Image (tube, rainbow, N blue to C red):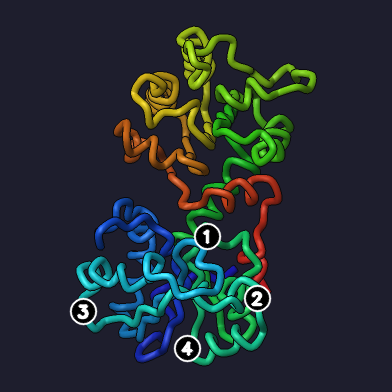
Amino acid sequence: MQTLNTNLDLKLKRVFVRCDLDVPVENGLVKEAYRLEAALPTLNLLKQAGAKIIIAGHMGKPEGKLVYEFSTKQLLPFFNEKLGEGNFELLENLRFDSREETNDENYARELASKADIYVNESFATSHREHASIVGVPKYLPHFAGLQFAKEVENLSKVLKNPEKPFIAIIGGAKLESKKPVVSKFLQIADFVLLGQKLGLDWREPVPQNLVLPIDYNDQQWDIGPITAAKYAQIISTAKTIVWCGPMGVFEEPEHSMGTKAIGEAVVNSGAFSVAGGGNTVDALDRFGFFNKINFVSTGGSAMLEFLVNETLPGLEALNA
């Protein structure tokens, strides 16, 4: 995988940057800009190098239809402010064309014809075999964006040579979707700590390094204080931590204790920490832990799939 760098001759080159534009927008205002901001180092590198920047991506699930609430035009004010008006071209939502999600070869060629170089800066969508992720790189010189490269580097670090003790914290609501990553970490982590809902739904024999909640709050929507204290004690011994998913329904104050307690324990541990997946980013932001984690992934499902398979279709396309 080649990463975009300042040694490349990019002056006046048309660079198609597949960004992660799928952010919440209300009344024309971006409510959570983390994924957009993560692309700015790459976009600024291209701007300083004199490239002609083409920003492309999707919002929501319009299913091949023109749906205004998913129009990427809503992001123009953000990019105008960050990059300067006229310094880029922002393409309309790629998923307004149904050929994007079917990885149509002609559509990939159409997109590739707009540019001289392709850059993938959308790690969070790179588990999808879509035209802009795996099709366009076939026709252009291709590079990983700066954030994309950081994702691969940091997630690989917790898989290949994590400093021990290595603790994995897995939360969220759907055991079916988290089961593969739980199984993977049971093979390599010293302890795997499960959140409230996953712990309730676990029906299989419990391996020695799998730790389930032992008490819950009254409505079973959060781990209880005994579990939180036990988890915090285990986390305090860690040298490496990966955290995927909150402990409960943290959006409601009465069910936020567990997630907040785990966040405090992770930060206070001094361990190398990687977090992401599900609503973890929202939780980190809500409780003021975001800037205290060593690496926060932009990926949800993509992060989980990478942790399980150690690759993604979008990464394979960059390696081809």
Which of marks 3 and 1 precedes in the sequence? 3
Whichever of labels 3 and 4 marks the residue nearer the N terminus, that label is 3
* Element carrying mark 3: loop
Q: Could you give the CA–CA distance between mark 4 and mark 2, rounded to whole angstroms?
A: 18 Å
Q: In this view, does 242 lie above or below 80?
A: above
Kind of residue indicated by mark 3:
Glu
The numbered dot on residue 103 is: 2
How far is mark 1 from mark 2, CA to CA? 17 Å
Q: Earlier in the sequence, mark 2 or mark 3?
A: 3
Sequence-earlier tag: 4 or 2: 2
Residue 316 against residue 245 in the figure, above or below: below
Q: What residue is rendered at 37% in x and 70% in y?
A: 68
Is residue 67 found left or right of 176 in the rendered image?
left
Label of residue 123 in the image: 1
Is any part of residue 210 visible from this angle? Answer: yes
Q: How crowded is mark 4: few (under 14 residues within 10 Å), some or many (20 or more)?
A: many
Quarter of the image for residue 196 reads top right
Earlier residue among tags 4 and 1:
4
Residue type pointed to by label 1:
Phe
- Disc 4 marks which amino acid? Ala
Q: Quadrant of residue 78?
A: bottom left
As shown in the figure, which amino acid type bears the numbered disc 2? Asn
**Badge 3 vs badge 4, beta-carbon distance below 8 Å:** no
Instruction: Tell me: 269 left or right of 168.
Output: left
Percent x, y for residue 8? Answer: 44, 81
- CA neighbours of label 3 inside 10 A, class few (<14), some (14 to 19), many (20+): few
